[in-house]
Amino acid sequence: MKTPFVNVSSLSLNSKLFWVLFTPAFIVSLLVAIFLLSTRFSDLNRNLHEQSRHITEQVSITSAYAIVFSDQNMMYRILQNALNNPNISSVQLFNSEQKIIAELGNASTQDRPFFPEKNEITEYDDRLESITAIHYTSNSLDGIFNSQTDPFNTQDQRSLIGWVKIESNKASLRLEKYQYSSLVIFTFLLFNIAMILCAFHTSKTLTQPINKLASVLGKLVKGQFSTAKLMKLPAEYTSIQRDLLDLTERLEYHNEELVSGIEQSTEDIRRSLDSMEEKSAQLHIANREAMESNRLKSQFLANISHEVRTPLNAILGYTKTLQKDITDPQHRLYVDTIEQSTNSLLAIIGDILDFSKIEAGKLSLESNHFNLKTLIDDVYQTLSINLLSKEKQIDLVPEFGLDVPEWFIGDSTRVRQIITNLIGNAIKFTHQGSVRTRVAIATENDQDISLSFQIIDTGIGIAENKIHRLFKPFSQVDTSTTRQFGGTGLGLVITKKLVEQMNGKIEISSDPSIGSTFRFTITLKKSTKIKSDPTPLELHTLILEPSSTYKSYLNNYLNSIGVTCSTCSDVEQTVALLNKQHDKIDAILLSVIPNEQSICEIRELIMYSTQQFSIPCILMIQPPGQITHYPDLKDICSDVLLKPISHDRLYHALQHLGMSPVTTPQPQKIGAQREKIKGLSVLAVDDSPINLQLLNHWLIPIGLEVTLAYSGQQAIDLAMNKHFDLIFMDIQMPEMDGMEATQHLRQLNAYKNTPIIALTAHALGSEQQQMLSSGMNAYLTKPIDEDVLISTIEKWCANTDSFQDQVNAKLIGIFDLEKALSIVDGKEEIAKEMFDMLADSLSAEKKLIKHHLENKDTKKLIEVVHRIHGASKYTGTVNIARNANFLETHLKELGMEDAEGVTEDFVEAIDELLAHRQLIPWTQSLDSSTTKA
């Protein structure tokens, strides 16, 4: 509702001055008019009251004798005299019984009046009623005519004989008030009109020079200096006009200088813009060249990966084939050396590709359930085989906090890579002592758990002034170290990037006299899998272990599974304790040092304990390769465990005391599995004759019919003339690559659902998705393992789903093609265009989401999520729409509280869509790609 008052601040100066002059006069005239009206009305009312009272009293006195003598003529004469007054409308006389005895005029028709003893006036809207009592005094004139009256007795004897009521009409009073009011109001208006004209003229006269000054100043602001010079003001403003002219001249001079400076600056800016445009063009060209260089770099890495892995595939394949038949130890050593060297070369290639992925921002983390303790045990076993030697005897000890669970959800491959890099470095640079891995819980909530790792070694250490070199690409602490120990200098760089990608950090403390400690944290999701507590074994063991560190490690674990221990440090102490407590000992754990004297002592101790007391022995060997030089030890002991001792393997060995370890697979089971694929027809396509020959060596002996093709076109020609149950397809081939050949094969009715497996050295995730989108069912990365190859054949030949069913299964919950088409009335071209617009923007939007989350900018984060949420509803991206809805609701209701987990799920949904984007079966896309091929 608007207020009726005028906003004074919005009025002009002329209006303000007008109101200042007019308002006092208006208020004074109003007060005078009110005063005159009030006094005049009061006088008129008072006169009417006095007149009514006077006439009533006069009639009361004169009518007393007429009432006493009942003289009607006299009564009416008295009433007529009173009625002759113009204000009197009626006169009535009442007797003592309150009955009317005489009346004249138009009396009001109202209820019976109240008869007071004294004069009383009652006022109504249209009249006045004046009533007074009529008294008769016995001392009046009638006593003269009474002879019995005592003339000397003057006492008055008053008696009530009636009342007189007179009504006065207010019409004349009201008319007189109206006339007087009109006169006062007319005078009031006339006076105020005169004051308005006077105030308006005065305000205009006083403000006109000021308005001229304001107008001139406004024109000065606009640069119209000539107008200011022509201005004329009254004589009172002469000094102001002179100063204003002086100011105008100065401003005109400064304006000319300013215009000149602006023109000069504009010319400079124009030249700068021309230069910037030239630089921008150069930068654009340089950026395009950099992008092209980056593309060529990725292509170069992919080609290098293919060119190196392809011959390595043949080397490793034939090496493993030779290992099956070699009996000569020296020749086996040579072959083992070839295998280890090849694996080292593969690790270097893997590091270079990982580093390239990290630089390009294409390294994504997977999510699966894994057992952390088993993973660390496997890492220790693998590294001890490759890095420990007869001369390097160190203790490898994993230590887990009691509250650390076994199962987690995360990328087990990358966790293994981090731990392998750090433990491998620790073992490599430690010559004696120990390498310990401590795992504890740093923080946790309902969904996530942050783990703290410490890799502690007693190695050569690192000088403090050289630690900063550790995490630089292609850099090592000392070039001499590089020559002695090898390496690319990428391991720790990749480790640091992986740790940071898992929301953690890594740091190091080192002292050359003590060793090094690497500390890092990673965040994983909690798993619903619960570790199964082992059944207590209720055994007593005797441990021969020279190392106090390893002795404590074994003792702690054995006590946790219900096994009591007696520990010894040498053979003599072990024999003495065995003779005293042999009836209490259920098993002996023996640590074997790989030298002739130790082997002889251990052999005699095993024979003595088994023959004399029938106590089984379990050997603990380090390094593992040494046991092959002493095959007789394997035959006389219960089990052989490789250091570092795995908890699960040790528990299994104690659970099966006295039983020989089973080291070979069951041939019947393997034979039954391979019987299922026997007789299948396989087409192998590769431009490398060596790789095709290797596949022949692997597949023909197990009963498969293998056909070889050396190009994509040759594969298509063979497929048109013969049906194959499975096809192995190389990717990079001349003339027609594997993906293009696969698209042509999928157009043939006979091969719409035939399993096509890629054999490739291309390891980048985007290339893997391109393979699957081209129509391939799966891929194997070179070098290919024989067992993996055969299990892949078994898996896909037993699969009865069509290729489209397999694609749809991967897209369930990620993308709904029917929904995307229904929104646009089945127009696939529009649906695909809308989807591509969303998908093309997701990479940039994902960076914005992470940026706003780090800066805790809730408003901007909601804007980005809402934008994606709106677009996802019309493009069939159901998983993104669902997670966007969750995140947007969370941000609006709870803000940034616990928003990291919901945001992470949303980002994972985006990554999942982008990873499966090329699998979406757009008819238009397939047609265009086919045409292009």
Image (tube, rainbow, N blue to C red):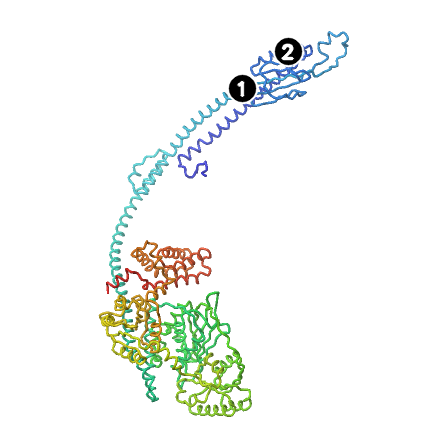
Residue 171 marker: 1
Q: Kindly indicate the quadrant of the structure image that contains residue 422.
A: bottom left
Q: Is residue 265 visible?
A: yes
Give the Cα distance between marks 2 and 1. 27 Å
The residue wearing badge 2 is 75
Mark 2 or 1: in front is 2
**Picture coordinates of residue 698 (x, y %)?**
31, 79
Q: Is residue 807 above or below residue 351?
A: above
Q: Are marks 2 and 1 in contact (CB under 8 Å)?
A: no
Q: Kindly indicate the quadrant of the structure image that contains residue 419.
A: bottom left
Q: Secondary structure at mark 2?
A: helix
Q: Is residue 314 left or right of residue 153?
A: left
**Picture coordinates of residue 652 (x, y %)?**
47, 81
Q: Is residue 883 above or below residue 354?
A: above
Q: Kindly indicate the quadrant of the structure image that contains residue 456.
A: bottom left
Disc 1 packing (10 Å; few <14; some 14–19; many ≥20): few
The three-letter code of the residue at mark 2 reads Met
Q: Is residue 451 above or below residue 10?
A: below
Residue 327 marker: none
The three-letter code of the residue at mark 1 reads Ala
The answer to which of 204 and 145 lies nearer the viewer is: 145
Q: Secondary structure at mark 1?
A: helix
Please report the residue visible at 30 percent of the width from the left and 60 percent of the height from the top. Answer: 922
Q: Which quadrant holds the C terminus?
A: bottom left
